[in-house]
Amino acid sequence: MYEYSVFWIKEDIAKHYFHKSDILYRFIKAYQKSHDRIDLKKQYDYITNDFPETELISHMKNYHLNNVAVQVEGSQIKLNKNLHLISLHISEKHLKFRCETLQDAEETLFPILRQFQSILFIIGNNIENYGWISPVPYISKY
């Protein structure tokens, strides 16, 4: 199973780093390895939004498109579609989910998250994979 983390990046940061996702990926990985470093913690807190757990759970429960079954157990959510199960855990600053394939997440989880918030950055925890959940939302002035 693959494990991924989802981060809600602040809009001004997303505008600047949308096409520099490798820099964002390396920063988040560095923070995860050394989360006790005060300088990295301050930067991480500056670039990320908190996930409002109650609102996200409510959104997922009310999402009825694509035949996704939603089961909530505290801050843990299980999404099931056509026997493809995704386990999602909500933390203050990120979401963590497990899936068999990224295609399962694309069909089951990502449409729900896109309706909730489109400025989400995803990284693989046990695989070197990263990117934005939605296509380019901004056109640069330059």
Image (tube, rainbow, N blue to C red):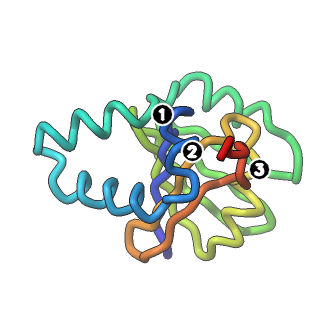
Instruction: Provide the residue designation for mark 1.
Output: 74
Instruction: Provide the residue designation for mark 2.
Output: 77
Q: Residues within 10 Å of mark 1 (few under 14, many from 20)?
A: few
Question: Where residue 134 sits in the image (x, y, percent)?
Answer: 70, 52
Report the residue at 39% width, 66% height from top.
125
Question: Where residue 21 sits in the image (x, y, percent)?
Answer: 49, 60
Residue 70 visible within the image:
no
As measured in the structure, the alpha-carbon distance from the residue carrying label 1 to the one carrying label 2 is 8 Å
- The kind of secondary structure element at disc 3 is helix
Q: Which quarter of the picture shows residue 28? A: bottom left
24, 125: nearer the viewer: 24
Taking 34 as reference, is 131 above or below it? below
Report the residue at 61% width, 31% height from top.
56
- The kind of secondary structure element at disc 2 is strand
- The kind of secondary structure element at disc 1 is loop
Residues at badges 1 and 3 in contact (C-beta under 8 Å)? no
Q: Residue 139 — which label?
A: none
Instruction: Provide the residue designation for mark 3.
Output: 111
Between label 1 and label 3, give the one nearer the viewer.
3
Residues at badges 1 and 2 in contact (C-beta under 8 Å)? no
Between label 2 and label 3, give the one nearer the viewer.
3
Question: Where residue 138 sits in the image (x, y, percent)?
Answer: 70, 43
Taking 109 as reference, is 49 above or below it? above
Residue 41 as seen in the image, left or right of residue 75? left
Report the residue at 25% width, 55% height from top.
32
Taking 120 as reference, is 5 above or below it? below
Residue 36 visible within the image:
yes
